[in-house]
Structures are given as structure tokens and as C-alpha cells.
Image (tube, rainbow, N blue to C red):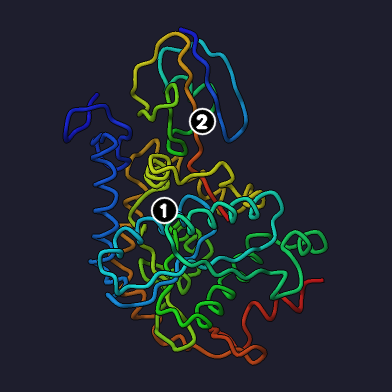
Amino acid sequence: MKIIAIDERNDIEKRLDVASIIEAANKLNINLEEVIITKNNELVTEKAKIKENDEIKFLSVISGG
Amino acid sequence: MTCSRCRTKPVIKLPNSNISLCKTCFLKYFERKVRKTIRQYKLFKKGQHIGIAVSGGKDSITTLYVLNKITKPQRTTKLTAIAIDEGIKGYRDETLKFAKKVCKELKIPLETTSYKKEFGKTLDQILKKNDIKPCTVCGVFRRYLLNKLAQKLKLDIIATGHNLDDEAQSILMNQFKNNITASARLGPITGIKSDKKFIRRIKPLYFLTEKEIMTYAYLKNLATKYDECPYAKDSYRDEMRTLINNFDRKYPSSKHSIINSFIEILPLLKKNHKKTDINYCKSCGEPTSQEECKTCKLIREIK
């Protein structure tokens, strides 16, 4: 199914054809240890189910300085 | 998948176990873990004046928020937020704005000093003219100024937002550089010895991962998008973070194992390095393990 995936750290937004959040993270080369995930602006785990047109945002947990 | 405790929708799967938690159960778990760390390692006593080093990033703001929540009922414990403005345009000015806002909301006084005020130059200006590693100069100057400010404000202790990820990185970095003396200074309470001029630092978030802290900060509206220092990318620490996170993804709980095994040997490390003297810098009089402190040496080196 097609979803909107956003990698906030690298300012990337893509429409991806994937079956899971984990697959979307892999396609964007995101280590799931380094992000929290929102689905349609609601915090979810990487195992959350997705459906067509969901917006999945990967928010970086990395801070520094 | 549901919350392991109350069977509602989960917001996080805890990194070191198969437990998933919903918002309510996670917030309770998080605060309980901070309380346990404070109690177990006797991080501070009631009635003390605690300085909280805030940068405006999620770790320090979460530390401020949680310590305020924990100490508020005690009434006798005083909190003051302390901040160092390194002078990183487009980053620190933004995070400090956020820190000011949170301090105002929580009614916690905020004391600030800056590289410009203390050294005559911002970090941006220093890096423009000198071929020097940003994190080296920043770490040295910031620790120096925090300690100086803490002495001026007569703080008993400084709380920082260091977390489990930071500590695991530091442990491996010290191992890779064969710098065990530096490791002996780590742990939930930093330093090896007490000294009247050295204000010890405590890490209430020591046993929480970056991911857990970001989850808490997100749920409590304590996170900003200006959380990553522009100079931190491609640093040695950044490479170590990637290495550990890749490893942890493949072999879950590796990070926790680094910390748990380190905590077991830490008392021995501290005991073995207790002979390390605390001197006072011949140039500025601040505490140092050498004849002259790193800050004075760096100030002479930079243009």
C-alpha cells in the first residue's frame, strides 16, 4: 500500500509502497533505534499497522551539543 | 499489540525488553525510573540547592521538568537552571529561547553566561579562525563555565541530562582511546573525589535511553526541532553512536549491557583512581587534574 513517509532529521518526504513501518524505515535507511514514530500525528510503535495514505513520521531522538 | 500493563494502545516498545507501554503507563514507568536512580545512587539530599544544566534540548529540559515534579512536594529543595550560550547561530539561540520559556512556565530561575562574555569570542568565531575539533573545545569550555557559575551561585550539585546512550558512548570511546581515568569519572555521580571548588554532577536520566527520553519529551510537549548541534555531525561521538545503535538493533540490549557491566566495575575504577589529585590551575585557580587546566591551555592556543 502507498503511504507518506517523512524522515524529519534529513528533511525527506516520500510516497512509499510498503507493507509495514519497518519496511518504510528500511527504505529510508533509518535505524529504528534512533527515531520515535508518529502515524497521522499519533505516537506509535514500529509494529503499528498501517493503511493506504497514512502519514508516517520518523522523528530523530538524537540530540547533541 | 497492546500495552503490556493495561491492554490499551502502546506508544513505545521498551528497548531492553519485550514490554510495550501506553502513554499513561510509560509516563509512570519513566518517572519511577528517575526516582529509583536518585534513591539508589543518593544523587541529592532534601534541602540542597540543585543547579540544572539546561541547553534547551530534550534531555536537559526533561531533566528540569522531572526534577521539578519530584522535588516540588519537598519544598526545601531549591532548583536553579543554569545555561551556557556557546554562540552557535541558528541553534543555541533557538534552544535557549525554548529553555527560557520552560523555566518561566515552571517558575524556575535561569542563570546564563556565554563564551562571548567569558572568553571574548563565540564558538562560531573560534571555529572560523581555528582548525580545531568543535566538540573538544565546546566540552572543555562548557564544563569549565558550568562549574564556575555553580560556584558563584553556591550550588550543591549540578544535574545534567546525560542519558544511557551518552554514557555507553563515553565508556566505549574511553576504551577505544585507552583512557580509563576518564571512565572512572563517569557514572550517575561524576568525579572521583569531592572538592570545595569542584561541584559534582549528577545524571538523573542515567538509566534511560535517548528513545525513552524523546518519547517522554514528545508526550509532555518538551521537544523542539532544534535538537541537534550542527557541529556534532561526523564527530567521533556521532560515529560511536551509529556503531552502538546498529549493533543494538541487531543484538538488542547491547547498550544496556554496556551500562550494567560498567556499573559493576565502576566502584573498583573509582577506588583505583582515587589517588588522582585535584590541583588548582596555576593560571585561573579553577580545579584541574594537571598543573594548568585545559581551558587556559585552549585559550592560549586559539586565535
Residue under the point 56% across and 47% down:
B227
Residue under the point 60% across and 22% down:
A13
Disc number placed over residue B141 in the picture, else none: none
Q: Secondary structure at mark 1?
A: helix
Q: In front here: B215 or B248?
A: B215
- Say above or below: B252 vs B155: above
Observer-side mark, 1 or 2, equals 1
Answer with the quarter of the image where residue B276 lies.
bottom left
Q: Chain of mark 2?
A: A
Which image quarter is the C terminus of chain B in?
A: bottom right
Q: In front here: A52 or A21?
A: A52
> x and y percent of residue B40 in the render?
23, 66
- Which amino acid type is shown beneath numbered disc 2? Ile
Answer with the quarter of the image where residue B252 lies.
top left
Disc number placed over residue B62 in the picture, else none: 1
Q: In front here: B83 or A2?
A: B83
- Which amino acid type is shown beneath numbered disc 1? Thr
Q: Is disc 1 surrounded by few (<14), some (14 to 19) or many (20+) residues within 10 Å?
A: many
Disc number placed over residue A30 in the picture, else none: 2
Q: Secondary structure at mark 2?
A: loop
> x and y percent of residue B301 in the render?
77, 75
Side of B109 where B20 appears, left or right: left
